[in-house]
Image (cartoon, rainbow, N blue to C red):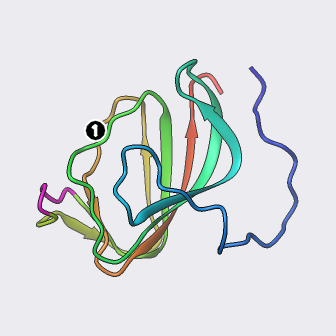
Amino acid sequence: MPVNKKHDEFHTLDMTTGWEVPAGYPVGIQQKIISGGLDEENRRGTRTRLLRFAPGVYTTAPFSHEYWEEVYLVSGDLIVGNDANGEGGKSFPPNTYACRPPHAPHGPFKSVNGCLLLEMHYFDPV
């Protein structure tokens, strides 16, 4: 399958619109799809998205999914491995990166002051 992204030269993103809460995430975590699309049911496609956490928001259980995921912490703080009450875990600063294969458990996540992540998701083969 060819990559499902269009040729898109440098342009300023509108950071005030196009945000939505992803399925299964708490209010206060929002995504903005900036390229492509992921068809999880048919296990194909690629997408690039921004994911932002409002201050103090956290998830309560680890995630696992069928696709590859690359994550870059652009700004703010991200805590990985907190408990269901948002306590504990390890804090990471900006310029932190992760690459996860399918089915790798990760999280839960929390941000004390809020954060912005750049994520790329794709199925193998791309």
Magenta range is 81-85
Q: Where does the image place residue 92, in percent across and percent down from the top left?
A: 32, 70
- The C terminus is located in which quarter? top right
Q: Where does the image place residue 42, in percent across and percent down from the top left?
A: 58, 18
Picture quarter containing residue 4?
A: top right
Residue flagged by tag 1: what amino acid is it? Pro
Is 6 left or right of 50, judged from the image as shown?
right
Picture quarter containing residue 17?
A: bottom right
Is 122 left or right of 63, judged from the image as shown?
right
- Residue drawn at point x = 53 percent, y = 27 percent: 40
Q: Where does the image place residue 80, in percent across and percent down from the top left?
A: 26, 59
Residue receiving disc 1: 105
Depth order, front residue of 82/20:
20
| 5 lies above or below 15 | above
- Chief secondary structure of the magenta portion: loop
| 42 lies above or below 9 | above
- Residue drawn at point x = 64 percent, y = 43 percent: 47
Q: What element carries label 1?
A: loop
Is 44 left or right of 103, judged from the image as shown?
right
Q: How many callouts does the rendering have?
A: 1
Depth order, front residue of 82/54:
54
Q: Where does the image place residue 19, in percent across and percent down from the top left?
A: 58, 62
Residue 46 is inside the magenta segment: no
Depth order, front residue of 105/22:
22
- Residue drawn at point x = 35 percent, y = 29 percent: 103
Answer few, some or many: residues within 10 Å of disc 1's Cα (few below 14, many 20 plus, some between 14 and 19). few
